[in-house]
Amino acid sequence: MYIPKNTSKMIAAPDTMITNMFNQFQSCNWKNITNEPGHIIFKKGTSNYDIIELKKHNEEVIFVTIPIKSGPYQYTTRFARYDDATNYINMHIRNYESKD
């Protein structure tokens, strides 16, 4: 994933961070359906709601969309840093995949 490194408000996503995120999704049977500069989407199964999306909106905003576990809904939030966004996604995927 390409992320400009010359921004003062947002850090670039290290390759290891993205690789770890991909590995976690694959281990939970999520499929990568979009992998473009500034835009990643993972989908699970056939539901149109089981989608996790990370999208760079501009130099200061990264949108993260996650599914809500208990129904056909999604939640979108935003971050200024890729490490915060990927940490949030990793936390969410662990919760989403839990049996509780």
Image (tube, rainbow, N blue to C red):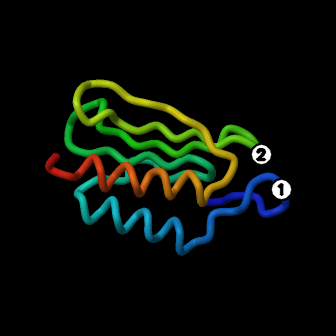
> What x and y, as percent, mark residue 83?
60, 60
Quadrant assignment for the N terminus = bottom right
Q: Which residue is mark 1?
A: 7
Q: Which residue is mark 2?
A: 59
Category of crowding for the residue at label 2, using alpha-carbon neighbours closer than 10 angstroms: few (below 14), some (14–19), many (at least 20):
some
What residue is rendered at 44% in x and 51% in y?
89
Please tell me which residue lies in front, 7 or 100: 100
What residue is rendered at 35% in x and 39% in y?
51
What residue is rendered at 32% in x and 44% in y?
43
| Left or right of residue 59, residue 2 in this image | left
| Left or right of residue 89, residue 15 in this image | right
The three-letter code of the residue at mark 2 reads Glu
Category of crowding for the residue at label 1, using alpha-carbon neighbours closer than 10 angstroms: few (below 14), some (14–19), many (at least 20):
few
Circles 1 and 2: CB distance less than 8 Å? yes
What residue is rendered at 48% in x and 51% in y?
88
Above or below, comparing residue 58 to residue 48 in the picture = below
Please tell me which residue lies in front, 5 or 96: 96
Q: Marks 1 and 2, how far apart in space?
A: 7 Å
